[in-house]
Amino acid sequence: MSLVYNQVWEDYAVDRVALEVGAEDVVLLVTSGGCNVLNTLAEGPRRVVAIDANPEQGALLEAKLDAIRCGTYAELWNRFGVPAQRRRDSVYARGSYARFAWVRAFVHAVCGWDAVRRFVNAPSLDEQRLRWLNDMEPRLFGPVVRAMPAALAGVCGMHWRQVLTTLRADRFFLAAVCRDQLRRVMMNHSIRDNYFWHQMLTGEYASASQCPPYLRAENFDAVRAGVGRVESRSGDLTSFLRASPPGAFTRVNLLDVPDFLSAARRLALFREVRRACAPGARVVYRSFSPHQPIDASLNGESPGGFRFERSLSAELSRAERTASYGAVHVYTTEAPARVRG
């Protein structure tokens, strides 16, 4: 396998509120680019377990952990911050980040370099909104581009499997969802503070303070203090959960893994998550579709033992800054029902 994700494309500001990680928590996360693991360390949890089916993602996490464990903050920033984003021999030259260059070129070609520059450098959120509505959105969602739904999905940062699934339903639905999700993000969040989209449009973070939390100087000591509490695994998530003892985890971040599973495999995953979680554990996952809570994604069949945090999920779905997801789903686990003898 080759490296796919150079960094996590899920908003940790949302995860932080969803999971409320504390000093006694044992956290299970999907490794991906490793940022979510390192960001979580700044919260001081008791233990973090990271697992990914792709061993290259685990290798990237180990490289980041080693840089934090053995180096200085300046060395970490040079290796994984803006200096690395500018180098052709860094980790950013591979995987999804390398594809950002194609997306960036597409947006610049469709909207024009000057329009993109004016949008990114808007002095206020009000001005940014006007630039989006007047300069960017009409060109991105004009008739020619709407005929290329895969290109729109690439702009949103969607995985090709999510694109294919949605296209099978309706390509015009895909365009509408992309438009709505981009509009929500571009009109409600400062682009300079949105490190996901600033790098998508310009190629790099806006500054050393507008980047993933683990790369910020003020978090370096806290992240370094937690490096020894990380356990990195490679393998299938459901199988790992099945082999874990009951109640082993108090916080679980599934990223968007359920989006890539069949209904039967999603059901198996959620059942193992419930079994391996302690009562009162918090679970978060994302879906491209705005309407994919557990029961809906399983055609009404429920694994049981989950309480959907509806209002919090709606709030965090609006707060997500990546535009790759239509919904953030937050659950808490309930104590198993007692069987009367």
Image (cartoon, grey):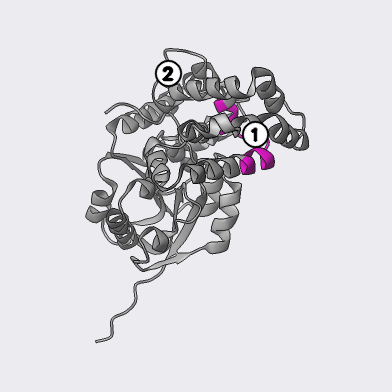
What residue do we see at 35% from left, 60% from top?
Answer: 298
Cα–Cα span, label 1 and label 2: 29 Å
Residue located at (49% from left, 39% from top): 39
53 to 216, vertically: above or below: below
Picture coordinates of residue 63, whole percent (x, y): 37, 26
Residue 137's label in the rendered image is 1
The answer to whether residue 258 is visible is: yes
Q: Check disc 2 and report the residue beneath it.
A: 93
Count residues near mark 2 (Cα–Cα under 10 Å), then give few for <14, some for 14-19, many for 20+. some
Q: Please, what secondary structure does the residue beneath circle 1 have? A: helix
Residue type, label 1: Glu
**Above or below 281: residue 257:** above
Left or right of residue 250, residue 312 in this image: right
**Bounds of the magenta span?**
183-200
12 part of magenta stretch: no
Report the magenta stretch's main SS: helix
When asked about the image quadrant of residue 133, the answer is: top right
Which amino acid, mark 2? Ala
Q: What kind of element bears circle 2?
A: helix
Query: How dense is the environment of label 1, judged by Cα within 10 Å: few (below 14), some, or many (20 and up)?
Result: some
- Vertical position of residue 30 compared to residue 310: above or below: above
Q: Which-is-in-front pick, marks 1 and 2?
A: 1
Q: Quadrant of the C terminus?
A: bottom left
Residue 157 rendering spot, x and y as whole percentages: 48, 34
Tell me which label, 1 or 2, sits earlier in the chain. Answer: 2
Which residue: 51% across, 43% down?
A: 172
Depth check, front residue: 127 or 299: 299
